[in-house]
Amino acid sequence: KGGADASVIVVEYSDFQCSYCARVLPTMETLKKKYGSDLRFIYKNKPLAPQLHPQAMSAAQYFEAVALQSPEKSWLFHDKLFANQDKLGEEFYKQAATEMGLDVKKLEADAKSSAVMERIQAEIKEAEGFGISGTPGFLLNGVPIRGAYPLEYFESIFEKLRQQEKESTDKQRN
C-alpha cells in the first residue's frame, strides 16, 4: 500500500495470530493516514511456531492465496484476519473468501501450493536475516525495529528518515 515513490518504506514481518501484531495495526493505520503517499507499507509473513500460534501458518497461506487472486482484496483479508484472531481456521478463511467474492476452490489449492509455502519460508528467512526473531518486526527504510512500539516512536523515526531524505535530495541538487 502507498506511493510507489514514497520516501519512507515500512516492511512489517507479522503473524496473524499474534496479539502484539494486532495491537500495532491501529498505529500503522494512523501512520498511513498521516503520511499518505509519502509512505509505502509492505506486509510480510512471519508465522511463529505452531506450539505458540497453531493457526498462524494457515492464515499466512490463505493470505498469500488471496493475494494471488486479488492484491487489493488481500488487504481486506489481512484486516479481517487481525480483527477476528479468535476465529482463525480454514472454515473462517473460506467464509471470508466467499464473502469477498473469491474463487474458494482456487484459494484452497493455492494455499497449499509449494509456491505459497516457498514465499512464506523466504519471508521468514528474510526477517531472520535482519535479526527479527519475534513478531511484529519492522524495517523502516532498512532500519530494523523489533516489537510493537507506540505511535510516537514510529513518528520520530519517520521524521528522521524524511529529514535524511530531504538532506540527501538537497545535496544532489547542489
Image (tube, helix red, strand yellow):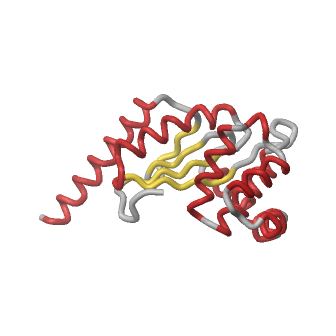
Count of labels shown? 0
Quadrant containing the C terminus in the rendered view? bottom left
Please state if 102 lies on the left or on the right of 94 as rendered: left
Task: Say above or below: 173 vs 48.
Answer: below
Tell me what residue is drawn at x 69 percent, y 44 percent: 81
Rendering coords of residue 28 (x, y %): 49, 41
Rendering coords of residue 68 (x, y %): 67, 68
Tell me what residue is drawn at x 43 percent, y 38 percent: 30
Rendering coords of residue 97 (x, y %): 73, 57
Please state if 102 lies on the left or on the right of 42 as rendered: right
Please state if 120 lies on the left or on the right of 154 as rendered: right
Tell me what residue is drawn at x 71 percent, y 64 percent: 102
Residue lying at the far right of the rendered structure: 51
Tell me what residue is drawn at x 80 percent, y 54 percent: 94
Rendering coords of residue 13 (x, y %): 62, 48
* Most foreground residue, 101 or 85: 101
Image-quadrant location for residue 31: top left
Task: Say above or below: 64 vs 151.
Answer: below
* Most foreground residue, 36 or 120: 36
